[in-house]
Image (tube, rainbow, N blue to C red):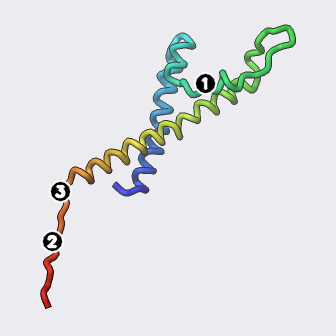
Amino acid sequence: MTKNRRILLSVVVGIALTIALAWIGFTRESRPQMCGFVWQACLTMRVFHPPDMPDGRVMEGTPADPLIFFFGLSLGIPIYGALTYAALSLAAKSKRSSSPTRCRRTQKREP
């Protein structure tokens, strides 16, 4: 498999895995179960959370919440794509090393 095909296939698999896992995650009834499938979105929600209210309450439901969530969700594409590319590269490398090599023995020619 050529390098361009590996890149294209890894991008397609990254998009498909992100969509499939998001769909499975959104069908779950609890947030911890959902975060098991869309972990990258939940991680970005934890890191980039909106500021707390002055009285200590957490301000949820701001317009920043969906933006942060979908940014984190879209991070799944390069993450899963890179993992797929690495797996395809390792598979191609092991396939090349296990195939029989053809060596030509050169004979010395005497003048």
Label 1 residue SS: helix
Q: Earlier in the sequence, mark 3 or mark 1?
A: 1
**Type of amino acid under label 2:** Arg
Q: Quick check: marks 2 and 1 in contact, CB under 8 Å?
A: no
Check disc 2: other Cα within 10 Å, few if <14, some if 14-19, many if 20+. few
Label 3 residue SS: loop
On the image, the x and y values in percent for residue 63 come to: 75, 25
**Type of amino acid under label 1:** Leu
Q: In percent of the image, x 40 and y 50: which residue is there? A: 6
Q: In percent of the image, x 79 and y 9: which residue is there? A: 57
Q: In percent of the image, x 40 and y 54: which residue is there? A: 5
Label 2: which residue?
A: 105
On the image, the x and y values in percent for residue 81 come to: 47, 41
Check disc 3: other Cα within 10 Å, few if <14, some if 14-19, many if 20+. few
Residue found at the very far right of the displayed protein:
54
How far apart are the alpha carbons under marks 3 and 1?
46 Å
On the image, the x and y values in percent for residue 33 come to: 51, 14
Q: Earlier in the sequence, mark 2 or mark 1?
A: 1
Label 1: which residue?
A: 43
Q: Earlier in the sequence, mark 3 or mark 2?
A: 3
Q: Is residue 16 above or below residue 54?
A: below
